[in-house]
Image (spheres, rainbow, N blue to C red):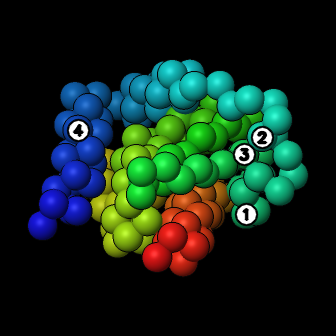
Amino acid sequence: MEVSETIAAREAEIVEAFALLDSWEEKYEYIIELGKQLPLLEEQYKLDENIIKGCQSTVWLVASYADEKVYFKADSDAVIVKGLVSLLIKVLSGLTPNEILQAQLGFLQEIGMMSHLAQTRSNGLRAMIQQMKHYALAFQSIHS
C-alpha cells in the first residue's frame, strides 16, 4: 500500500541517521541540528491559539491544506523540542489527512526516543502528534 510506503521510507531514513550516532549526546546534538534547519515560523503564526497544550516548552504548530495534502510549520522556544517537532514534520508533512491519521510513528520507539525523554517531554511529544492528527482530521472532514 502506497500510504505506508511513504511514511515507512521517511521513518527508515530517520532510523538510519540515528543508527549512525553512537551516544545519546550525539543523538541530542543531531536533534538540535534538525531544529535549527526548520524553516522559521513567521511571527504572525506565533499566537496563543497555535500553541500546543500539554508541552512544557512553548511550541507553535500551524497546518495548511493544498493539493489534498496537509503541510505543517512549527517553532519552539526550546532547541530539543524544536528538533522533535522537526522530526514529526519530516515524517508527516505533505501527506493526505488519511495518511497522517493512519501513521503509527513507530520510528520514535525504534530510535529509542520515548524511553530517553523525560516524562514531561514525552507527554509534549504525544501532544504534538495528537495536534497534528487533529489538524488532519479537521481537514479530512472539511474536504471530504
Foreground of the two, 38 or 141: 141
Q: Which is more foreground, mark 4 or mark 2?
A: 2
Rounded to the nearest angstrom, the CA distance separating label 4 from label 1 is 28 Å
Decide which of tag 3 and tag 2 comes sooner along the chain: 2
106 displayed left or right of 40 = left
The crowding category of the residue bearing disc 2, from other C-alpha atoms within 10 Å (few below 14, some 14 to 19, many at least 20), is some
Asked whether the residues under the numbered discs 3 and 2 touch, taking CB atoms below 8 Å apart as contact, a structural biologist would say yes
Residue 13 shows which numbered tag?
4
The crowding category of the residue bearing disc 4, from other C-alpha atoms within 10 Å (few below 14, some 14 to 19, many at least 20), is some
Residue 141 shows which numbered tag?
none
- Is any part of residue 133 visible from this angle? no
Residue 60 shows which numbered tag?
3
Q: Which residue is mark 1?
A: 54
Query: Which amino acid is tagged 3?
Result: Trp
Q: Secondary structure at mark 3?
A: strand
Q: Residue at x 26, y 44 (%)?
A: 10
